[in-house]
Image: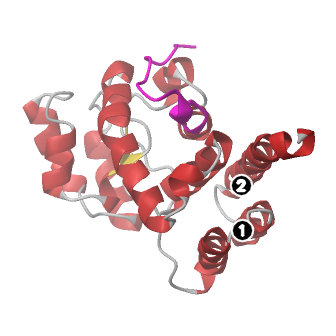
């Protein structure tokens, strides 16, 4: 398994480890076996490249900018055909792109330089207290936001709304319960077991962060 490159902020390492565990099976070895070429992870997703970079959920301008130094122009232009496509439209296009190769180091470079920066901004918009949380709590939230996005609209987003409110009100103990409650959404669904495992891992990470956060008070 390949080791990831060092990062500037060590506090991000728990988030990176958690995201990579579920997006690319932990690292380079799994990536090279299963994700070296474009995929469609679930029937509802878009064509995805690199480390969970969903072409169905980005813009042409953003994609071309993010990958400018990491893919040849001809491959970037071919992949532009997948921008905004999800579900069956993405599935229909996938065979035409399955010979595009996205090397691990290039995928990791985009993840560090682009994805994490964007994700951190999303975390701060989702919760003003984001930067004050322990690293493992931030890791859990970043993994959740990376996987689900930050929308709080609709019945399926009930727990996302409640998590946002709990963060605002300082009710951090409620958050692992709310993360686990989301498992209901994937019972019996395609890709469900993996997402259920991910929610459990995020809940455990948040609890770990809370434990570290409270430890000094116990010694006072």
Q: Please tell me whether mark 2 sits on a helix, a strand or a loop.
A: helix
| Above-or-below relation of 210 to 67 | below
Q: Which residue is mark 1?
A: 182
In this rendering, position of residue 200 left or right of residue 97: right
* Residue sitting farthest toward the top: 2
In this rendering, position of residue 13 left or right of residue 50: right
| Above-or-below relation of 168 to 134 | below
> Residue 38 sits in which quadrant?
top left
Q: Please tell me whether mark 1 sits on a helix, a strand or a loop.
A: helix
Q: Residue at x 33, y 61 (%)?
A: 57
Based on the picture, tell me whether residue 161 belongs to the magenta stretch.
Answer: no
Q: Residue at x 75, y 45 (%)?
A: 213
Say if mark 1 contacts mark 2, CB within 8 Å: yes
Q: Which residue is mark 2?
A: 199
Residue 113 horizontal/vertical position (percent): 30, 34
Residue 141 horizontal/vertical position (percent): 59, 54
Assess disc 2: are there few (<14), some (14-19) or many (≥20) residues with their C-alpha within 10 Å of its C-alpha.
many
Q: Which residues are magenta?
A: 1-15
């Amino acid at each position: 398994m390949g080791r990831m490159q060092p990062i500037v902020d060590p506090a991000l390492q728990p988030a990176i480890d958690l995201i990579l565990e579920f997006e690319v099976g932990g690292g380079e070895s799994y990536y090279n076996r299963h994700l070296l070429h474009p995929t469609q992870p679930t029937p509802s997703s878009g064509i995805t490249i690199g480390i969970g970079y969903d072409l169905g959920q980005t813009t042409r301008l953003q994609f071309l900018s993010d990958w400018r130094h990491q893919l040849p122009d001809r491959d970037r232009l071919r992949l532009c055909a997948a921008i905004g496509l999800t579900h069956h439209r993405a599935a229909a296009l996938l065979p035409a792109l399955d010979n595009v190769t996205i090397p691990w180091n290039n995928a990791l470079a985009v993840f560090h330089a682009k994805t994490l920066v964007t994700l951190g901004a999303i975390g701060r918009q989702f919760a003003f207290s984001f930067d004050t949380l322990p690293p493992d709590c931030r890791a859990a939230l970043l993994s959740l936001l990376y996987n689900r996005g930050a929308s709080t609209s609709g019945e399926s987003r009930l727990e996302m709304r409640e998590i946002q409110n709990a963060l605002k009100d300082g009710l951090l103990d409620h958050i692992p319960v709310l993360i686990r409650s989301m498992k209901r959404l994937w019972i019996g669904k395609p890709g469900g077991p993996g997402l259920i495992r991910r929610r459990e891992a995020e809940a455990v990470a948040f609890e770990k962060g809370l434990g570290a956060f409270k430890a000094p008070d116990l010694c006072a």
